[in-house]
Amino acid sequence: MAQGAAMALTVVSILIAAIPVTYCYPTAFQELEQINKNRTSIKFLAVGDWGGVPYPPYITAVQKATAREMSKVAEQMGADFVLALGDNFYYKGVDSVDSPRFKDTFESVYTAKSLKVPWYVLAGNHDHAGNVQAQIDYSHRSDRWKFPSYYYELNFHIPNTGKMLTIIMLDTIMLCGNSDDYVDEKPRGPLRAVDANRQLIWLQQRLAQSKADFLLVAGHYPVWSVSEHGPTECLLQRLHPLLIKYKATAYLCGHDHNLQYIEESGVGYVVSGAGNFLDPDVRHWNHVPKGTVKFFTGQASTLGGFIHAEVTKNKMIVTFFQAKGTSLYRTVLSQRNFE
């Protein structure tokens, strides 16, 4: 009898473990605003660590300059959406869905028509110091703030090409733990191992099943970085092998407050964390594989920065912009090769 009860309990436990709670999100294709019927690409911006400050005027000069340049690039080059790569509200996220910070640091800053497109959001370590669920709930209050769950998958048809783009949005804080910037603390392991493992299993399933021609993964913490925080050991162990095995096109992140491009084992690593502060620190330059760093800037003179990406039928063009109005670096990534 006891054995039967234990077995039933095990089955129930397995079923409970399989329920994704509110953490992940069902797969569906996102509809692009089809402005031009003849278009054959998807374009987007990616900016991280953009989240202002918790005292008046609730924004920084870098955030303001970056927002202005983002609007110009979006208008001139096109942007179907924006990826917000975490640390959306400094320094302790928001406390509730009614927080005035949504208006002061987001809605009132990115006001240009060209930025009134979907913003796909993920959480950073500073967001996890507050209430991430409140940021998720804000999706119901805003036409453009899209944050359906802690981690989720976006799928897009590249117009008129028969090709597909997938972006997997991760919660690297849930995966690796939080970090305290003020003591340069590395993530010390997840708050709840069950949540971390559930996300990792989900991620592996999504990667293994993906037939996308371009497969991007985004998170807050970097896999590779030459700057203050350096490579994230937990992601090197848990994520890095999956990116290589499943032929991810690129990994996009923030956390370090600069722009970086690192290419390693066929994967492009984009750090776009210059949306609000700038940091020229390169203390981990020798902690990434030799010869992999293709581009770095964190100079105050840039006034801030972000990336613009265009995904076409057979390539992805990534351009790094500084807020003072010029592109700094451009790279081209190939579509996935399944052979």
Image: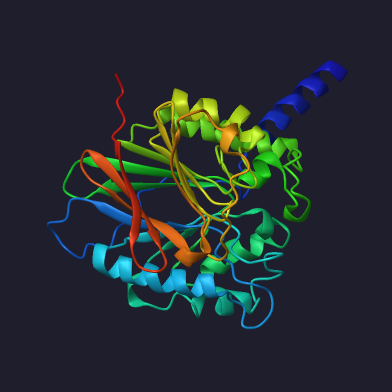
- Relative image position of residue 326 (x, y in whole percent): 33, 63
Q: Quadrant of the C terminus?
A: top left
4 is higher (above) or lower (below) than 291 = above
Viewer-side residue, 317 vs 38: 317
Q: Residue at x 60, y 30 (%)?
A: 236
- Direction from residue 176 to residue 338 in the image, left or right: left
Using the rendered view, name the quadrant where residue 74 is placed.
bottom left
- Relative image position of residue 152 (x, y in whole percent): 51, 47
Task: Return the residue found at the far bottom.
Answer: 56
Question: What count of labels does the image hold?
Answer: 0
Q: Residue at x 62, y 54 (%)?
A: 124
- Direction from residue 212 to residue 93 in the image, left or right: right
- Relative image position of residue 282 (x, y in whole percent): 58, 45
Using the rendered view, name the quadrant where residue 333 is placed.
top left
Question: In this orientation, does residue 184 appear?
Answer: yes
- Direction from residue 247 to residue 122 in the image, left or right: right
- How is colour applied across the structure in the image? rainbow
Task: Return the residue found at the far left.
Answer: 38
Q: Quadrant of the N terminus?
A: top right
Question: In this orientation, does residue 116 appear?
Answer: no
140 is higher (above) or lower (below) than 128 = below
Viewer-side residue, 43 vs 135: 43
Q: Residue at x 87, y 19 (%)?
A: 2
- Relative image position of residue 133 (x, y in whole percent): 65, 60
- Direction from residue 153 to residue 285 in the image, left or right: right
328 is higher (above) or lower (below) than 14 = below
186 is higher (above) or lower (below) than 2 = below
